[in-house]
Amino acid sequence: MMAAMLRAMLDDRLGEGAVQIRSSGFGPVDLPPIDDAVDAMRRRGLDVSAHRSSTTTALLVDDADLILTAERDHVVKIASLSRDAFRRALTLPEFLATGVEALDDHTEATSGEGGDRVRRWTEQLTGSRTAGGYLRESIPEVADPTGSMPRTFEAAVVAIEQQCREAAALIASRSR
């Protein structure tokens, strides 16, 4: 759901296809989205019914300029695939807190083009982060609504949608 919403929001802000979004995970491969997710995205004008789960690989994360995850455990698993990717991997709420804080501190974007600028900015955001510190800190995560009652599921999707909207604004501001 995060990937679909971010793709649509960034396409609206930057133009279709300006940013490449990929979705992957650490569970079984080639599974369709759950019905609740398909329905929630359909209500937002997004069709995720053809999506199939795929595996996160070192090649995938090494190629990424920014890696947004739902859970801290995902960031840790990404770091185990690629030490370099650890500096570009954040939970979605962690990215928002860190990115907004950087904007509030008037951190300037590093020069470069598009993704290169985003990659350098992301590495600046996480530059002081250490693996040990990351494991000890409280890291905000996305609430997983899977298996929730319909109202609870929708409330979680609304929260994810708002976080994606804020992330799209941050990413767009550093992609131009």
Image (spheres, rainbow, N blue to C red):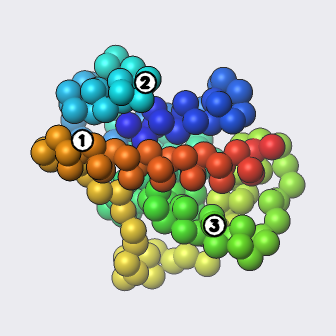
Q: Is mark 1 on a helix, strand or loop?
A: loop
Image depth: mark 3 or mark 1 in front: 3
Image depth: mark 1 or mark 2 in front: 2
Whether the residues at callouts 1 and 2 have beta carbons within 8 Å, the answer is no
Q: Answer yes or no: is residue 8 visible.
A: yes
Query: Where residue 7 appears, x then y in whole percent?
Result: 54, 33
Residue 66 relative to residue 162: left or right: right
In the picture shown, does residue 63 fall above or below 69?
A: above
Query: Where residue 159 appears, x then y in whole percent?
Result: 39, 52
Q: What element carries label 3?
A: helix
Q: Answer yes or no: is residue 127 visible.
A: no
Distance in Å between CA atoms under marks 3 and 1: 31 Å
| Sequence-first tag of 1 and 2 | 1
Q: Name the residue: 71% across, 27% down.
A: 15
Please give the residue where the numbered disc 3 appears in the rendered image: 100
Query: Where residue 8 appears, x then y in whole percent?
Result: 55, 30
Distance in Å between CA atoms under marks 3 and 2: 27 Å
Distance in Å between CA atoms under marks 1 and 2: 23 Å
Would you call the spot at circle 1 few (<14 residues within 10 Å), some (14-19), or many (20 or more)? few
Please give the residue where the numbered disc 2 appears in the rendered image: 46
Residue sitting nearer the eye, 62 or 140: 140
